[in-house]
Amino acid sequence: MAKKQTIVPPFLQALLDARSPTGAENEAQDVLEKYLKPAADKYEKDRMGNRLATLNPKGNPTLMLAGHMDELGFIIRYVDDKGFIYFDVLGGHDRVMIPGRRVVVLTKGGEVTGVTGKRAIHLMSPEDRKKVPEIHQMWIDIGAKSRDEALERVSIGDPVVYQHNFELIHGTIGASRAFDNKSGCYVVSETLRRLAEQKKKLSAKVVSVATTQEEIGTRGAVTSSYAIKPDIGIAVDVGHATDHPDCDPKQHGLQKLGGGPIIGRGPNINPFVFERLVKCAEKENIPHQIECEPRPTGTDARAIQMAGEGVAAAVVSIPLRYMHTPSEVVDLADVENTVKLITAFALSLKKGERGIW
């Protein structure tokens, strides 16, 4: 019997293909224009670059769904006399992962391919081999022979991303750069698309936001939360799958790849929203996991919760291995189950339910 082939949603594939480093989210914005805008009753752009899609604008309560579309990257800082490019980071990188990667510089004139370089191990002292290079000790090589030649092709401030695209590893498990957080952006956007097909059952006003600049401080979520004034807000992001070697569950909890969406619980999460999410998962037979969040999370939820008079916030995470590396690993079944959970939650809301406890 032939094995069933995994079908990758075209919308998700397009978001993963889009290069959208923090502050330069243009390609992801174009994907949202194509796939999300037609489903919305109202589609807005703002000065931060956020994309806001509204469904059932007269509904009550107002539910905000946030998934950031920006990804890790680099930014060109300096070009030396020999044409080697020095950079700074966009977002939190593990420096040990940077050297020896193929990258793409996104310029006004188009793409410029390069390689991240550092001194080879053969040319290091035993002491140097034990050290992780600092950012200023690495560079990007685009094959230029001089500063002038390099600056004909790139400019100071140009953004750079890894050239590691999506690939299925086995079954529904795939690897890609920027699953953090193209998968969450896909979930909140796809949820709105599916709710549009069930609009008659929907009491809430739903605003799906593809936020910008999460990787440098949840900046897009701050402004969009104030603009929307939601009663309830859910951030969908990735969370650490800790079911791999060298990860102690006593320290980090146990969240499994393929175990379903991770529902956060703690002070950043409103009790009403948490309990309703769990109830929806149980009612719809959606596999799910619980994760403790003892402090404000490193997600858009921390910005949403503190907006205006306060918002009933929650975090739902997609299990992911190897976060903030060029090859993050996700089970597409978890992505689909997260869409189902957020859709069920939105449909469960009744008029006047605002998360007050």
Image (cartoon, rainbow, N blue to C red):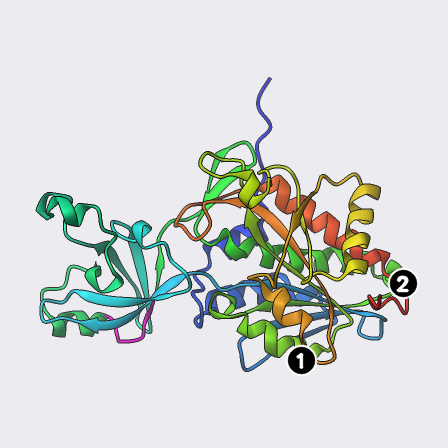
Query: Which SS does the magenta portion mostly show?
Result: loop
Residue 105 within the segment the image draws in magenta: no
Query: In this orientation, which residue lies closer to the viewer: 346 or 254?
Result: 254
Res 226 label: 1
Q: Secondary structure at mark 1?
A: helix
Find residue 4 and report its horizontal and vertical position in percent: 60, 28
Q: Which residue is label 2 attached to?
A: 350
Is 329 left or right of 99, judged from the image as shown? Answer: right
Dot 1, crowdedness within 10 Å: few (<14), some or many (≥20)?
A: some
Q: Residue furthest top?
A: 1
Which is more toward the observer, 86 or 293? 293
Q: Are marks 1 and 2 in contact (CB under 8 Å)?
A: no
Residue 44 is at least partly visible in this image: no
Residue depicted at x 77% and y 52%: 277
Mark 2 burial class by Cα count in 10 Å: few <14, some 14-19, many 20+ = some
User: In the figure, is residue 214 to the left or right of 94?
Assistant: right
- Disc 2 marks a residue whose amino acid type is Lys
Left or right of 136, for residue 42: right
- Magenta residues (range): 154-159
Distance from the alpha carbon under mark 1 to that under mark 2:
23 Å
Q: Earlier along the polypeptide chain: callout 1 or callout 2? A: 1
Please give the name of the residue rendered at 16% of the width and 50% of the height, measured from the top-left corner.
128
Rendering quarter of residue 118 = bottom left
Query: Which residue is at 74% across, 79% downward?
Result: 309
Compared to residue 130, the image places residue 310 above or below, namely below
